[in-house]
Amino acid sequence: MKDVIEGIVVSEVSYSETSKIINILTKDGIIGCMAKGAKGLKSNLRVGTTKITYGKFYISKKEEKLSILTSVDIINDFKNIKKDIVKISYATYIVDLASQVMKHNVDSNVFNILLSALIKINEDFSPVIITNILELKYLEYLGVMPIIDECAICGSKTSIATLSSSRGGYICNNCLRDDLIVSDKTIKLIRMFYYVDISKISNLDISNKSILEISNFLDDYYDRYTGLYLKSKKLLKNINKVS
């Protein structure tokens, strides 16, 4: 039985000297399949089975066995991402994150958000900002969305003073203790990040201060509430220290 699936290659693992096993993120979940001979220089599967490739994958399903990949029609190989160490580091991380989120919650929007983010990074939009938008959106599918429409402590919708990862989101002036104060711009941007359609973004003019504040908030929030510890995230942090 042959099927056609549309998706993004999120991992590739060598299998024997010439073949590999790939995992493809689709709108319906993650599908693994064997790509026989894909490591060969002349193989028509070589390019289409590399990580961070979006395409149509033609597979032959095997009962109780790994499906066999027979051919690939590449839709987008994200060449611009793959020739830049910073872009590919962010792309690798969000692909790994999407895989974990999809395992937790199979939802077509997990795929849609990832695809839109990769396209924007490939189009030279800030990988930091696009990644932060994706990270914030994914928290909803992980079931740990911060409270960003009212005070996380008392529920007040007025006089929001800051954004706190340890206290779960917005904090108003009345509930403020020794919390780190972020800028008013950052308070507004975090809501914009959640509601914006990544595919519709045409301009990103955000100060370095707000980018840093949002990145720090999301890093700490993920560490506190998601239980996800990705090697690609550690590598990304190391690259940012150097760059």
Image (tube, rainbow, N blue to C red):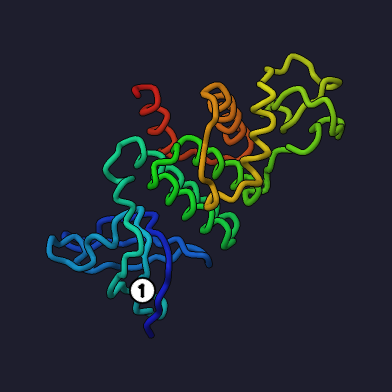
- Residue 83's image quarter? top left
Q: In this rendered view, identify the residue nearer to me: 240 or 33.
A: 240
- Quadrant containing the C terminus in the rendered view: top left
What residue did someone put label 1 on?
67
Percent position of residue 148, x then y: 73, 37
Specify the farthest residue to the left: 42
Percent position of residue 37, x then y: 19, 67
**91 left or right of 198 in image:** left
Percent position of residue 16, x then y: 20, 61
Q: Residue at x 51, y 58 (%)?
A: 111
Task: Relative to 103, say whether 166 is above or below.
Answer: above
Q: In this rendered view, identify the residue nearer to me: 186 or 93.
A: 186
Q: How many marks?
A: 1
Specify the farthest residue to the front: 202
Q: Give the amino acid at mark 1.
A: Ser
Q: Residue at x 35, y 75 (%)?
A: 59
Mark 1 neighbour class, 10 Å CA radius: few under 14, some 14 to 19, many 20 or more? many
Element carrying mark 1 = strand
- Residue 153's image quarter? top right
Q: In this rendered view, identify the residue nearer to me: 237 or 75.
A: 75
- Quadrant containing the N terminus in the rendered view: bottom left
**242 left or right of 36 in image:** right
Percent position of residue 125, x then y: 44, 40
Specify the farthest residue to the top: 178
- Residue 238's image quarter? top left
Task: Relative to 138, say whether 219 is above or below.
Answer: above
**135 left or right of 191 in image:** left
Q: Residue at x 49, y 53 (%)?
A: 116
